[in-house]
Image (spheres, rainbow, N blue to C red):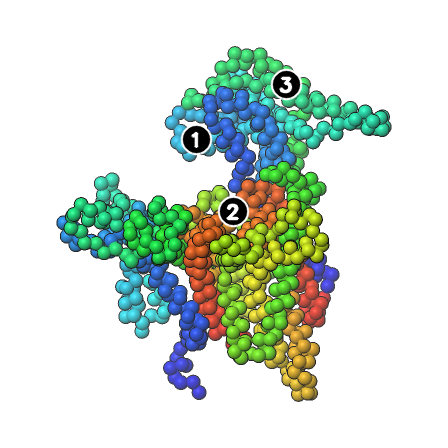
Amino acid sequence: MPDTAMTLQSPLRLALRRVWRQGGARFGAAVLAIMLFAAVYAPFLAGDVALVWRDADGWRLPILSDLFNKSSYGKHHDLLFNLAALLLPVLLFTGWLLRRRWTLARRILLGCLVVAVGWGLCQLPLLPSAKGWSAIWSLRGPATETVAVATEARAADRAVIAVFPPVPHRFDRPYAGAVLRAPLERNPVTGARLWLGSDANGKDVLAYLLFGARISLTIGLVATGIAMVIGTILGAISGYFGGKTDLLIQRVVEIMMCFPTLILVLSIVAILGRDIFVIMLVLGLTGWAGTARLVRGEFLAQSVRDYVLAAESLGLPRWRIMFRHILPNALTPLLISATFGIAGSVLTESGLAFIGLGDINAASWGVLLDQGRSFIRYPWIIYAPGIAVFLLVSSLNLVGSALSDALNPKGAR
Amino acid sequence: MLAYVLRRLLLMVPTFIGILIINFVVLRMQGPTLKDEISQGSSQGGEGQKIERGIASLESFIARFERSGANLPSLVNTRGFADKADAVRWLRAGERRAGMTRKEEAKRARSELDLWFLGRWYAEPLQAVLADNALAGLHGPASVAFSYAAYIPVQAEDYPPSLSAEQKAEQTPDELAEREERMRRLGGIVVRNAELRDLRVSYHNGEAGFVTDDPELAAKRAKLLAWYERHREDFAHSGARAWRDLVVATGFVKIMGGLFTGDLVSQSRNQNVYELIADRWQISFWLNFLSILSAYAIAIPLGIRSARRQGSLEDRVTTNALFLAWSLPSFFVGTLFLYHFCTPHGGRDPWFPNRAMPADADTLWMSTPRYLLTLGWHWCLPLIVLCYGSFTVLSRYMRGNLLEQLDADYVRTARAKGVGADAVVYRHALPNSLITMITLSAGLLAELFGGSVIVENIFSVPGLGTLLLDAAKQNDAPLVMASTVISVSLLLVGILVADLLYGVVDPRIRNRHA
């Protein structure tokens, strides 16, 4: 006889509880949480803009305004992570307050929505400036409270108090004097330690890895998100309608499954330019075939159930039956395949970057590893990004397989 | 059963064609790199000289394009329906105007380049432009475009091989006559091309647009029109021909035709694509074969072992170790091997070579066993990197299937009858659990004959993977298409064979299809 607390919970919740009981899943989730934290708070951990600054004008927190500075962070996903860094404490607290009212999924979705809206607001021209209305994202020039400025001011005997991030190096700044330094050596330009050494351009590997986590997580989420949306829609249509529609969509799925992705990525990157977002898009657009098959199978099995028949006889519109009635019942396998999909797209992106097809302007782990192979005598450039990819992928795989063990009655052994 | 196979084969056709078309269009969208070459080569210097300087090279480019159909539209060729208005539109699109933005200028430059590759369909419309006195401003570029449209490329390979006196004596009169005829025809084409070259009117394409200031304009134009009258039948249009060319005279059909007749030349390497692939496939095949063999040979016993000792320490250790190996990216492991085993450290020679093929000079005089040993030494690391990733999937699958079978009633019956533990597993449960392993073999065929890009890239294997990567990077449409045709057909056949095998071993499935 199960106790009452258990019977009141939804099957998904029970399954999640089962997942949590597995050591591997807990380890994986912990690693993922640390990576997410490092990615979100990367500017506070590595960067040359001061956290706290005091000069003749008084006290300031320059890092906070620098979070909205396009000249410091060129890529769009950086703004998203910066906003998340600012909003995360508020969101966590609100989520905790609402814990009895709303489900976990709803709270997470709302949090994402808030960050996304904030991202949109930062891109819109809402602030008056010298050049007319402009967006907060493109308003600021280069930051003035940096390591270089502080060193200069101290040399000129001006009283400046500055607290810098633990790694006072920008991830994308090549220090010409510190090329291929071994781990723990000091950067002769700033005097700070290079905890994981520096690469062939003189960039700090640790700072690079921290910002690379942002790229990898974004790629995983965006590429898998696109693939999930396309795959779910096509698979749902295919499985629910059957017949000729099914035959046609299955051909498209088959084309996608057999298509040589490498060539597609190469060509599209050649057409649209080597941008990390283009690569995400291509990975998403080519990776949906498996999802479509999965969802189709689920829909085939579900569409003969009584509740679907009931909904149909009530005259509900078809999209409503498909996406409000059947889809929630097919969510669990989707969740599992999404977890593995994120790991897969992270791997694919690093692999592509490794064979020289990555975005060299983005802090991608694969690009660094490719450099490690060209400069084969400097093992830290191989180990650091390789272990980072391995940790991310293996923790995602751990969580994924724990999920599939817990949600799949057949795999319960 | 036969009906089922036929149905499956028929369903493959649209998939196959779909993949090829998408692949080709994507390759084409990238734009032929040869055109980039031309535009780079001709961007220096003034407009008038550029054309003069570019003549020889443009003609050779047209000849190169002709062989792979790169001068034709990708899928639909509407040039057969072109009239004078279309020709004027093309010419105007290439005209420079004052105050063009950078983007407009780039678009204009592309149109102007395309102008030289319009092909024979545009000869008549361009001639109509030249004949029209009202369009005097366009006569210069129209004459140049006409000369390229009517140009017939002649390659060194087109000529019959030269013969010595003795060889000539051996030929029959008919053969000699045919040879004569061929030489005469080629000579005619060369003369014809030379005539066209002389009839080009020089012009300027500056801020003011096209300015034709050739003093011989009137004379050349009259000669050109007369030339066209002489060769009119070569360019005669008819509705039926235009409709045929709509589909047939396209880059896609040209490349596909070349693929099926075996007469397709790679753009970047100037060699027959099948020869290129034939040179490369063996090393990829043997590497893949050995890696798949060792993956199965190691993973299946592992899976059986951990299924029989389910829940024991050994089972847990293998499962977790394999799980971690699964998450290790092969490019990381490969690079680590390269660093630790193939790079000299502190005066010590590396343990393994960093290239997957020994140099020919070293192996030429080796005895066969010694050669094989050397080869094994070179292939050891690439093989490990290739196969460790598939251990996990295979052994997990094996373990899961075997456990499922060991739970079944017939196993309990066998045990109750007193069959020994080994016999229960190897005689009763194992054959049944191997059935489902067949589904994993669907991709095997394509995997065998395809190269692994990453591993071949790390260990510099001269295999199909590196060939494909280079071809795709250089936008070598014929080579990419050839390898796509091979890999996709192998994949489709593999899927079908796996399905059929499934039916062979499992009567329930066979009956469903019948």
Q: Position of residue B204 (x, y in %)?
A: 47, 20
Do the residues marked 2 and 3 share a common chain? no
Image quadrant where residue A7 sits? bottom left
Q: Among all residues in the image, which is located at the extreme front?
A: B347
Cβ atoms under marks 2 and 3 closer than 8 Å: no
Report the amino acid beneath label 2.
Answer: Leu
Q: Residue at point 15% right, 50% down?
A: A159
* Residue position marked by numbered label 2 in the rendering: A266
Image quadrant where residue B3 sits? bottom right
* Residue position marked by numbered label 3 in the rendering: B195
Q: Residue at point 44% right, 58% down?
A: A383
Image quadrant where residue B156 sits? top right
Q: Is residue B117 above or below residue A33?
A: above
Q: Is residue B51 above or below residue B412?
A: above
| Dot 2: chain letter | A
Mark 2 secondary-structure assignment: helix
Category of crowding for the residue at label 1, using alpha-carbon neighbours closer than 10 angstroms: few (below 14), some (14–19), many (at least 20): some
Q: Position of residue B415 (x, y in %)?
A: 66, 85
